[in-house]
Image (tube, rainbow, N blue to C red):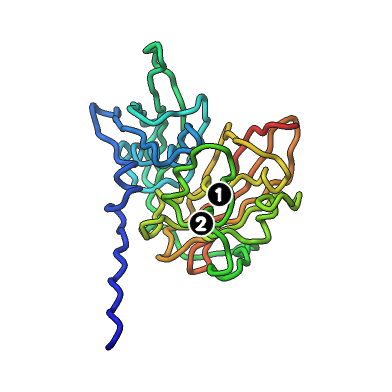
Amino acid sequence: MPEAASAPVTRATIGDSEFDRDTAVVRRAPGVYGIDLSAGWTIISAVNGGYLLAVLGRALGDALPHPDPFTITAHYLTASRPGPAVIRTETVRTGRSLSTGQASLLQYDDEGAEVERIRVLASYGDLGTLPDDVRTAARPPVLPPMERCFGPEDGPAPVEGSSAITDRLMLRLDPATLGWALGQPSGKGEMRSWFGLADGRDADPLSLLLAVDALPPTAFELGLKGWVPTVELTAHVRCRPAPGPLRIAVTTRNLAGGFLEEDAEVWDSADRLVAQSRQLARVRLG
């Protein structure tokens, strides 16, 4: 008797995935948006910085005349919590090829006072109008095949408590950057991984803002433990990604005074560098 055919896997599409629903904003007034920040994108009780960047990026994409983030710089002022939030945007300048705006995300604390969580300044354009010329010395990271890499389900949680965000991501980490999970960190400050959304949605410019802050911190490979909160993050989106999984490489060259930088490169299935970022993060020493 022939075996029954397996049911086809349904993949989410851009505009119809959990990521799109959880970053959707509601316009309440010109330049003012509301959102319920989802608990599905948290690490312990704090909302992930890349998810927040995508939320603000979506609001600015609605407020500005150009569709795509080219560069966005965020300062994380206080930790965001799941629940209601307000985003206030302002158009700073509009031009033919670029428009610039700023946005703040605010929530209320336990006493009912308004607290600013994150503030961004961004320039938007149209990635579809950029020329195709590429002159670069950058090279995509060399990763083992996906089946020889490891996901969060294969090892211990990187930080104690809830890491709900890992259930929404497809992460397959390079074993060469997983010494920390075995109690043998390499000391090199590197993290590399295949990356996608768990529901199969392909990447777009907005989800690249999530991707640059989605991997475990390089601090783990430096022998440090615990939460590594972002202080400031700047992301550059270079082109629209091709369908298929992304590859992400993150490196840290300097840790001093309790702060480190993380430089991230995001490559698509066509071997194009589609996004870059640098962030400053705080670490706990000792």
Q: Is residue 97 left or right of residue 220?
A: left
Residue 203, horizontal then vertical, whole percent: 40, 57
Q: Is residue 91 left or right of residue 166?
A: left
Which labelled disc corresponds to residue 249? none
- Mark 2 residue element: strand
- Mark 1 residue element: loop
Q: Amino acid at mark 1?
A: Leu
| Front in this rendered view, residue 267 or 128 | 267
Q: Amino acid at mark 2?
A: Leu
Q: Residues within 10 Å of mark 1 (few under 14, many from 20)?
A: many
Residue 165, horizontal then vertical, whole percent: 45, 45
Q: Earlier in the sequence, mark 1 or mark 2?
A: 2
Tell me the quadrant of the picture where the C terminus can be found.
top right
**Above or below for 107 versus 136:** above
Q: Is residue 188 left or right of residue 82?
A: right
Q: Residue at x 34, y 37 (%)?
A: 59
Residue 19, horizontal then vertical, whole percent: 35, 48
| Residue on which disc 2 sits | 171
**Above or below for 218 versus 178:** above
| Residue on which disc 1 sits | 215
Residue 227, horizontal then vertical, whole percent: 60, 35
Q: Residue pushed farthest bottom?
A: 1
**Is the residue under label 2 in contact with that under label 1 (CB below 8 Å)?**
yes
| Front in this rendered view, residue 194 or 138 | 194
Q: Residue pushed farthest left?
A: 28
